[in-house]
Amino acid sequence: MAALLFFVALRIISGGENTWICVENEWVRHGNPSAPKPETGCGIYKGIADVGSLSGKVTAGPFCPVERVGVPCPVPPDAYSSRDVRIYKTDGTTLVTTKNLNADGTYKLELPAGEYIAEVVGFGMRGNERFRVKILTAQTTELNFNIDTGIR
């Protein structure tokens, strides 16, 4: 009986199955919520109404000294997971946030609306290229990176 009461109380406190939850500073649909996605940020941006997203994909290569057209070398397991996207204020030195890349080289993060400098950093990289990005409220800005490993 006590276990049943515990699970009922937990269900009430957790907000049920059909709601929006905050995961890594982003609103994620949990179940089938009837309410629209919240307009304010969550996590570290909770209460900030002017929040947008930055997302993209990082591609890197070549990974072999001799790579033939149509026969790419296998991508090493840590080719992307060992790298981060870093976001700086427009002064280029004040770090705002860092996000690890997913295993497939993709990333997505939430930021307050405004302008930033973005770069990818990680093991074995030379001369990180930086890009200026503008984040707009309730919109996703896409920024893709191409990394030349220098292997020839």
Image: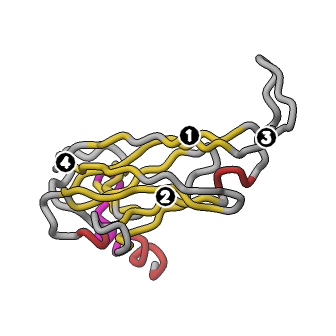
Task: Return the mark for residue 85.
Answer: 2
- Residue matched to label 3: 63
Amino acid bearing label 1: Asn
- Give whichever of 109, 4 is nearer the camera: 109
Disc 3, disc 4: CB below 8 Å? no
Q: Position of residue 26 (x, y in %)?
A: 34, 57
- Give whichever of 88, 51 is nearer the camera: 88
Above/below status of 30 relative to 47: above
Q: CA distance from mark 1 to mark 4?
A: 24 Å
Question: Is residue 50 rendered to the left or right of residue 99?
Answer: left
First in sequence, mark 3 or 2: give its number.
Answer: 3
Q: What residue occupies the far left of the structure in this picture?
A: 49
Magenta highlight on residue 102: no
- Residue matched to label 4: 136
Q: What residue occupies the far top of the structure in this picture?
A: 70
At horizontal 61% and vertical 58% (from top left) the residue drawn is 83
Q: Quadrant of the C terminus?
A: top right
First in sequence, mark 3 or 4: give its number.
Answer: 3
SS of the residue under disc 1? strand
Q: CA distance from mark 1 to mark 2?
A: 13 Å
Q: CA distance from mark 3 to mark 4?
A: 36 Å
- Residue matched to label 1: 146
How dense is the environment of label 4, judged by Cα within 10 Å: few (below 14), some, or many (20 and up)? some
Amino acid bearing label 4: Leu
